[in-house]
Amino acid sequence: MSTDEAPAPAFVPQKEIVYNKLLPYSDRLDRESDDILAKIKGHLGRAVLLRELWPGVLFWTRKLSTYIRLYGRKFNKEDHVLFIKLLYELVTIPKLEISMMQGFARLLINLLKKKELLSRQDLELPWQPLYEMLERILYSKTEHLGLNWFPNSQRPDSAASKSIILNILQRCSVENVLKTLVKSCRPYFPEDATQEMLDEWRPLLCPFDVTMQKAISYFELFLPTTLPPPLHHKGFKLWFPELMDLWVSVQNLPGWEGHLVNLFARLASDNIGYIDWDPFVPKIFTRILRSLNLPVGSSQVLVPRYLTNAYDVGHIVIWISSMLGGPSKQTQQQLSGLFNSITSFFHPSNNGRWLMKLMKLLQRLPASVVRRLHRERYKKPTWLTPVPKSHQLTEQDITAFVESMKQPVLLAMFSKTGSLEAAQALQNLALMRPELVIPPVLEKTYPAMETLTEPHQLTATLSCMIGVARSLVSGGRRFPEGPTHMLPLLMRALPGVDPNDFSKCMITFQFIATFSTLVPLVDCSSALHERNDLSEVERELCSASAEFEDFVLQFMDRCFALIESSTLEQTREETETEKMTHLESLVELGLSSTFSTVLTQCSKDIFKVALEKVFNFATTNIFETRVAGRMVADMCRAAAKCHPVESLKLFVPHCCNAINQLTVSDDVLREEELDKELLWSLQLLSEITRVDGDKLLPYRPQLVPILRRTLHLKCKQGYSLSCNLLHHLLRSTALIYPTEYCSVPGGFDKPLSAYLPIKDWGRPGDLWNLSIQWHTPSAEETAFVFYILDTLLQPELLRLQGHAEGQLEMSRDDILQSLSIVQHCLLGAGSLLPALDGQPVPNLVPSMVSLEETKLYTGVDYGTCPVTQRPADHILEHSEDDTKSLFSIIKIIGDLLHFKGSHKHEFDSRWKSFNLVKKSMENRLHGRKQHIRALLIDRVMLQHELRKLTVEGCEYRSVHQNLLRDLLRLSTSTYSQVRSKAQSVLFTALGTYNFCCRDLIPRVLEFLWPEQQHVTQQQFKGALYCLLGNHNGVCLANLHDWDCIVQTWPALVSSGLSSAMSLEKPSIVRLFDDLADKIHRQYETIGLDFSVADSTLAIAAQIVQTPLPLSSVPLPSAQDVETGRERQRARNQDALQKYEKLVHTLLECLAQRNLPWKFEHICIGFLSLLLRDDHPLPPPAVRFFVQSLNHDALIVRKMAISAVAGVMKQLKRPHKKVELNPYEISGCEEPGELMAGDRKDNRWLQYDGKNLLKTQEAWEACRFVEKTHWGYYSWPRKLLLYAPVQEQPPLGRSRDEMNEMEQIIFDHFSDPKFVDQLIKFLSLEDRKGKDKFNPRRFCLFKGLFRNYDDAFLPVLRPHMERLVADSHESTQRCVAEIIAGLIRGCKHWSFAKVEQLWELLCPLIRKALSNITVETYSDWGTCIATACESRDPRKLHWLFEMLMESPLNGEGGSFVDACRLYVLQGGLAQQEWRVPELLHRLLCYLEPKLTQVYKNVRERIGSVLTYIFMIDVNLPCTRPAASPRIGHFMQRVMRQLKPLMEADEEIQNHVVEENGVGEQDERTQAIKLLKTVLKWLMASAGRSFSTAVPEQLQLLPLLFKIAPVENDDSYDELKRDAKTCLSLMSQGLLYPEQIPLVLSMLKEIAGSSSWHARYTVLTYLQTMVFYNLFTLLSHAAAVQDVRWLVIGLLEDEQLEVREMAATTLSGFLQCNFLSMDSPMQAHFEKLCKTRLPKKRKRDPGSAVDTIPPADLVKRHAGVLGLSACILSSPYDVPAWMPQLLMDLSAHLNDTQPIEMTVKKTLSNFRRTHHDNWQEHKQQFTDDQLLVLTDLLVSPCYYA
């Protein structure tokens, strides 16, 4: 670019990665990124202009995402917007194949991710294209027929190298990518989008239909909530009241309620302060509490759907934290209420499936509040709406929030699920209010460190301390005394380094490391004398810091003890393995990282003492090199790394001397077993050389001779240690890396007067002032590296070359030794060696765009170096069993291909651990990048490594080609271990080089062709494995590309004829299974159409021309563009030909004579994958599949059924639709406001028994609406209905009017023999007892009758008549499938044909229903339900009239009656709200029959009633239903139940179970009726949308009377049902206006004469209050009512009732529904003092005491009240408790039952407070303690 003209405008990047600026070669990066960006813009634009989606556009979009990964969004706003628009156009190309769409979508998500960079002014994106795409893919009409294959597993193509960065998108299914894409585009939808969306989806809101779920989830996904306040009237105000009312009024958690909650949560967090949530808060919290599924009360029946559809905790948390604050503090009150009521569930003694949810809530809520605080106080303002001042969180809000969470978090620390969630919660709470949270944690930590018996307590408290470490150490104005705890904690943690308890040891290491990273370990005590400007706390800290040296030395002693106890000799016998066990390696890691952290943070003085100590320990002992040796060497390495000069001065001379002395004689070189001391010195030396390279140079003269001497030791252990030394020497001098990770730049060695380390405790690193000390190789070091390579590597290469040419004999060990030297040289100096060079391999793919690789500078200018020769061939030919050398060769090839100084997997694990550490110590409150300096340096280093590892899209050159062929040869060699190692290297390489798969596939397939005679079984297996690929790499058998599949699939099938293939070997059979399985799992429909829209081209042209950086690639000429068009056409043509060729080839393979059956099945499986919805299957394949319907093998028949059903869909002729106005049809005008439900303008849709369509004219005049939901809520903007018959495709065609495919099917199905055989097969049973109605077969028949109308009826009719008469399970199922297909297939038949059809069907179905059996009734239910689904009821009037004839006529016994009802219910349920007349008729028919005797019929009637009344909902703006109403029905029922209501005696189930002669009396009839009504109540509890509370209340008194008290299953059906009903009703959600009704009813029952009823009232209350807690609390009168109800029942004359009342009271106190106030306490104390008369001496004659019961009851009530208060706080001791315990103890010797109550209470108190008795003791005075100790271990236990 020339810059001599006018100065160009400055380049302002959107947001780049800051860490690049800190790299040692950062000055070069701007030029490099400009260069790359210019290339990307030029080539990407050019590729689009030339319409070359593949490979051009795909290649360059991938480059763009790599660019974003390396530089962030380093392009200006103009380019950013253009990139987004271009990709949006590309993603929404209609026929794009899925894998490309996913690739584009991921990049687009990445471009849109930081929404603050682009405001709504900069960018606007339409929403319709996205909606159409989701509709096409997620609700695909053809996927279930196998015409479209979408991937659901992780995709190999893009995941390999981006896996770390994109792990958020790792949930790779298409669905998630699409949803994330919509979320990212949402902020940029136009302002009118909301209204358009509502118009589009409102018509789907029919609560009885599945479309409701779809509509609500679309709302959740698409509705924009970030519009600026002036536009709110175009945004959420359009829908908020409507959807909120819907949510508030719906009950029983339907599946879509969760989506609504997510939408509200998002709305709340985007518009804090603009919505008044106060009216809804109690309702919201009641529902949240219900959604947690907590167990309440004694016997509980949970409604099953609560378990599945509960709300998502992540969204609840966002919603709560967005409602906090603001003028009315209501949300905080309710939140405190919520935590108060569920606190006791967090206690570690409680456990259940609900616990995970609670823990999640605990962990996420503080994080969410911190995020909000950050947004309000610290975040840079962006274009998004800020939170108004009035609604920002105040200090008081924060304190209240932390207070309310403190108690549950402290309990959850010791939870059974581990303390992780609590620790994360504490970390966030401590950021806001350290002074509230940290002291109680400390109080728990100190005792836990003292105890030896409870290790779990220690691990839990330590992990929580690690969470709050940063807040503790940095002190700050809120918690200045925090830092003073640090030293005592560190000193007390030391005993945790304990060789006997692994988990304790690890957490202690982590604890010490965390604290020492945050704090410089410098002794500042002398500052006390030198400076006088210190505060009190600082003085305290200075004097304490004198202990640091002590701490470091004690820590080292502990470590030494740990090491000595874990030497090999101590831990295991000689015979066992010599490697480290997994635990040992973890301990080693923990030890070395902690030790190096401690030393890094030490001052020079402390370091010197420590170094001396380590040196003595290491040199005075000799360690074995496997376990203890590694640990000691690690400690020495840590020391050497911190201060290399001092450490090397001690260690190097010592080790060198030892080694030189021990290797003086040449015999040592040939010894098999070396001296322990020699090995140890070598190990030590090899570890301490891993330090800063230039500090090593002075020791060259000592080190090089040692290498020469020891590299050729005979002993393998010896020379591998020596190789390590070589590797580390080279690495230290050749790599770029930071040399120190201290927490303050420049270290701590400054005079105390100038710099006080105390001030830096817990201080974050300053990103702009990191001053990293880099090690970059100097000229001297580079020279040293090449000197070593020349002296040590060159001779080895020559020897190997000589051996390969056959001039030199070498033993196996020698070869292995040479290879390992070569490998270690490569590993050490890999970063200095130049890349492999060579000619690019030509002609792999045709492209008009350059596909060049981009070179990244990584700070090294390459020298030159000898290239290795390939000894692999030689070994393979001469000694294939030398596997160890082959392993070594595979490693070398792998390194040559990929190694640039660091390994991918190491990088991945470092990235992971970096993220973990970052999480555990980050400060989310004050904003990002406030990390500790060591972490920031680590991140910069990772950025450097990322640049080294980015090798995507490398050109594939001839060198690589040769290496890959070697690998392939190794992958198909004899030994399986060699094969698998070589394969994994091969797979990695395949993902690295562009298009190299196309070069390799033919070579792999050579092993499979049957013509090859000399392929061994091993080679065959190796080749199959190469095709299979590993679990996340490329799968060669299934590349999404016609060129490849055309080769691989036929090869796989015909390999069945290869001589090496044997089905006797299970491993080969398994391989083929895996291959077929993987192809089926990963295959997705490959595109046939690669066209690009013209609108896209315009954007591309703009991209090429934008300046800054201007691209050097010229715009394509007009001729190029024309060629591009041509090539696009040609490519589409070519794809089609390949598709057809593949189908024909596979058919030819099938025709081969002796193909084994397994391969035949695999081949048919492949063929079935090739059905598509945009191109019909070639006729030969159609013929094959139709014939296969009668294949002998079941599995083939199944595939054929699916395939033929798919072919039918392909051959379906399109039916014309026309637009109609629904208001014209009904003759009403449009209503002004929204009204759902039965209105005048949708009445014409409903079934009308008076005007059935009995004539052709009526039939043709009728407008059929097939979709059930149209018109219930509102009409669609364009109502499309089918055009009249004349305009539809003609029916009854002759054979000549059909095309070839249709003729094939026609011929087969007109042939009676073929049909005969087919029906025989279809009526066989597959798996006995497991078979169900099969939708695939139904689709087959539906397609037949849809495409050929009634052409095949004559052939099928006799079969159907025969099958119906046979009552076997499988024959009945077969005929049900055919009938369902017929009814659905006759959608477009003419009236005459339909009428004839029903004349045939009605008798058939009648007959079937009379033959129905246990096995077949569900199939018939499914059949009728499927037949009625999405059909206008007026079309099916024959069916409904027939089913309604008289379901319960008693013919065939009770079972057949129940089944008939079941089938009818299936049909009516599908019709939902459109058949009110039928529902009325059915109800009238059923009502007299409600007193049925048979249980199964009763249950079925109950279920049918649920469906009859389901339409009667009280949802907002819904008209009263035209179908039957519950209210009217209940009035009639209550009249009949009157005899039971009035009677007083207990209701027994004394009905004789048979219809005796003569009418029974009213009472017996009433009992029978009640049984059925109960069944209905139970069935509707979980299904209906709104519970009819007022109606159900009338039944309550009756139920209370019947329900048994004890939990005993031996009761009769009536009592059990009554109990279940009560349990379900008490869990119901109450609306505020219903509360007084319920309570007055309960009061009335509490005064009833039956104590059972009074007892049950209490259990009912418990559940009801908990499940409606906040709704009740917001209603003060209700709380008082409940309170007096319970306190009144405490004085009941029946003992059981009194005890239950006490339990209930204590429950209410515990969940803070009632509070323990002084009037209540006074009331109980007064009752307790009720005098009892003195006992008189008994006469032996009188049997009973004569105490007036009333007084006793009162006194007992008082005692029970006190006991309830005590038991209501099981885990702590409030201030009022000691006094109450004293009052209670006074009654220990009262008469029974009082004495019993007191004893129970005391023993319970003792049980629950025993764990933390030490704490609880403090609440009592000494006198009270004396009394208490007396009581708790009182003699009365033994009296």
Image: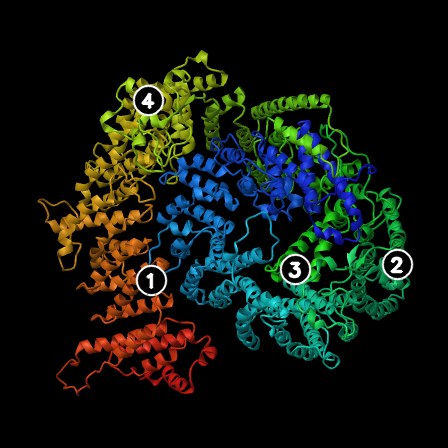
Quick one: label 2 or label 3, which is nearer the N terminus?
A: 2
- Report the front residue among 802 and 462: 462
The C terminus lies in quadrant: bottom left
Disc 2 residue type (three-letter): Arg
Q: Position of residue 1552 (x, y in %)?
A: 15, 50
Q: Is residue 285 left or right of residue 419?
A: left
Q: Quadrant of residue 1144?
A: top right
Disc number lying in front (3 or 1): 3
Q: Which mark is residue 930?
A: 3
For mark 1, what is the residue? Answer: 297
For mark 4, what is the residue? Answer: 1357
What is the CA distance from the residue labelled 3 to the residue labelled 1?
48 Å
For mark 2, what is the residue? Answer: 708
- Report the front residue among 510 and 933: 933
Quick one: label 4 or label 3, which is nearer the N terminus?
A: 3
- Report the front residue among 945 and 1002: 945
